[in-house]
Amino acid sequence: MSDDDAPARYDRLERHETAGDRNSLWHWREAKSLFEVARNYVVTWLVRVSPSLTLKNRLLLALGVTVGEGVSWGLEATPDVFWPERITLGDDVIVGYDATILCHEFLQSEYRVGDVVVGDRAMIGAGAVILPGVEIGADAQVAANSLVTEDVPPETTVAGVPAEPVGRDEDGEGGGAE
């Protein structure tokens, strides 16, 4: 993929080069303190297993996530453990069972960090993975088990790996990719 073809999310990512023979994950302690990541991990575990939406939202706020009114965070769903403060959830967002929102990616010679913004009333299906730098528009829907590598426009449904827009036939029946 050329730079001209790269999704907009790539322009929003901060890149941090790492030196040495090992991949960038070996350098995570240069980016975040052990205490902060350990604390985030424990709070994230509580977010994942708590059945109370009110408690989940309070714990997400404690992690630094921006949480709108009426957010529904599903069981086993996971916010980024390293940079949860880079997640913004609009009002009435639904994050489905076992979905993951990542704000970082560790690569061989660099790691990247980016904000994830989920618009009002957007829905993220069970098992979906959202990559760093992605923006999901208001009223958008991400199908279960999808990998979101690019922005999702408002009122758009995406599905697949990687997630692509899906539409409906004129008679309202499910259709293929637009």
Image (cartoon, helix red, strand yellow):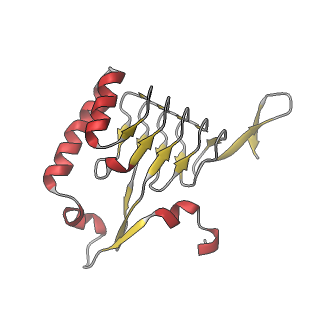
Residue 170, image x, y percentages: 86, 33
Q: Is residue 27 left or right of residue 71?
A: left
Q: Is residue 140 left or right of residue 101?
A: right
Q: Is residue 30 left or right of residue 8?
A: left
Q: Residue at x 37, y 67 (%)?
A: 107
* 83, above or below 169, in the image: below
Q: Quadrant of the N terminus?
A: bottom right
Marker count (numbered): 0
User: What residue occupies the far right of the structure in this picture?
Assistant: 170
* 113, above or below 116, in the image: below
Q: Quadrant of residue 136?
A: top right
Residue 135, image x, y percentages: 53, 50
Q: Is residue 108 visible?
A: no
Residue 2, image x, y percentages: 61, 74
Q: Is residue 114 visible?
A: yes
Residue 86, image x, y percentages: 37, 51
Q: Residue at x 30, y 70 (%)?
A: 23
Q: Is residue 19 left or right of residue 152?
A: left
User: What residue occupies the far top of the structure in this picture?
Assistant: 52
User: What residue occupies the far left of the structure in this picture?
Assistant: 35
Q: Quadrant of residue 137?
A: top right
* 23, above or below 141, in the image: below
Q: Residue at x 57, y 49 (%)?
A: 161
Q: Looking at the picture, tell me which residue is in the foreground, 176 or 36.
A: 36
Q: Residue at x 26, y 73 (%)?
A: 22
